[in-house]
Amino acid sequence: MKTNGFIIIIAVAILAYLFFEPITATGSYSKTTNIIPKPVSVENHDGFFVFKPSTRVIAEKDAKTEALKLIDALAPAMGYKLKLASKARPKARAIKLAIDSQISQLGDEGYILDVSAKQILIRARQPAGLFYGIQTLLQLLPASIFSKSEVNDIKWKLPCLKITDYPRFQWRGLLIDPARHFIPVNDVKKFLDGMAMHKFNRLQVHLTDNIGWRIEIKKYPNLTKLASNRDRSGGNGGFYSQEEIRELVRYAQQRHITIVPEIEMPYHAGAAINAYPYIGINPARVEGMPLDKRWAVLGGLAAPRPKTVGFMQDVLAEVIELFPSRFIHIGGDEANLKLWENDPEMQAQMKQLGCKDAHELHSWFIKQMDAFLTENNRRLLGWDEILQGGLAPGATVMSWRGIQGGITAARAGHDVVMAPTSHTYFDYRQAPAERGLSSNVINLEKVYSYEPLPPELSNEQARHVLGGQAQLWGELIPDQNRREYMAYPRACALIETLWSQKQLKNYENFITRLRHHLKRLQTMGINYRQLD
């Protein structure tokens, strides 16, 4: 009996070693799937898949590109680079990525991740799904897999399970604001890396505003020569060359993120008006006036005369050459329309166009941009003020002043992105004592509680709600450190609302998973706010 007992103890010890790696300084193995955002379905099975240098990654055709991304993601921490092959060797452990048209019910971004002791299989209808399956695979490993250098004290392995997953919404976005404080190219890339790990797929970039113009436009060189040289803090500003824009677009596309450019008009156009006064109201006032004196006179509201329409369409023509995004954001918000009502030229134009008021003139201007973008196979996206005076036929509304604009647009058959100040303005403070653009507090729990689909909408109308987006306006965000602090972990809460199924959401469970997830952010060098 003593001998049998000893054998049992040894057997238990061996099993424990094989299946439950002890906690190390850099991570631990667990059958718990602390994944963010929460997948649709997880089936746990016995055992682990153990990685070895001899493990092969199997992929063909379109799956090869995603397979190479997986190999590159694993290599730094593991200390060895897995080999890509078209076929698995007999009885050898392998990771297989496959495009599978038979799982069309999961959509273009869904995936199935099936882990057994002999094989990891990721299947998806499209490459984007394979990419998101890879992000989930990485989260199943210890947080140190996100290290940029080799981690020697871990035996890398994955728990055997099957995950079926797909997003609830197609638009899962964040906004950054280089117009107020310029964001260097490498900082944008790092921000994109964090988005990709969380399965965000839209980055709106607020490229222009009253304070600065941040994108090179060849036809109008003064936009960068004269209008990019300052920022909100009185710094030197900056801008993205067209080649840098192309570089960022490529970088984002590799992570299945679409960069959505925002070119503000007719308000928030002060930087452009200073560089080219003829697009402003009563430009004769500043003839011969130095650039630094023009701002107080011209303000930020463009005058929607034909020359201004032509100017903005010229700008958009170059923008759409740089950005493949189907949606081009033209702002359209916060215009003080009384300035048009009190201007003789604009009064005459309203009369000529048959506009009964300045709201209709605003709508006329937006419709010129909508027609231009439609002709160029793009879609206009604007803040909910574009509803005033009548919505342009092809317009999509980004609802920020609450949700009513989104409800109105959806009921009228227009697509909507929900981005209300109540839950998605991440430049607002996270606690009463913290600094933020507003005294309103948007804490982690409030973000998690957000529901993008208003109950007032019918099922048919609800189909027009593409998803949601959080805004990181740059007035009080001067650098990457602050931007990350304001984004995370609130972005973790938002992505669970936008990706995960509504019935699966549970705040207490989210916090439990988030405590593990924060180790990943720390390893990636992302500056997040500590949990209260």
Image (cartoon, helix red, strand yellow):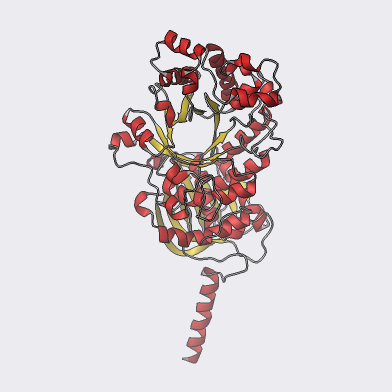
Q: Residue at x 51, y 12 (%)?
A: 345
- The image shows a total of numbered marks equal to 0
Q: Is residue 219 visible?
A: yes
Q: Residue at x 40, y 14 (%)?
A: 355
- Residue 497 in the image: x percent, y percent? 42, 48
Q: Is residue 387 left or right of residue 472?
A: left
Q: Residue at x 41, y 41 (%)?
A: 169
Q: Is residue 141 visible?
A: no
- Residue 443 in the image: x percent, y percent? 47, 53
Q: Residue at x 58, y 17 (%)?
A: 279
Depth order, front residue of 232/341: 341
The correct choice, above or below, for 455 with respect to 242 in the image is below
Residue lying at the far top in this picture: please name it: 352
Q: Is residue 501 left or right of residue 51?
A: left
- Residue 123 in the image: x percent, y percent? 47, 46
Depth order, front residue of 453/114: 453
Depth order, front residue of 326/181: 181
Q: Is residue 432 left or right of residue 210?
A: left
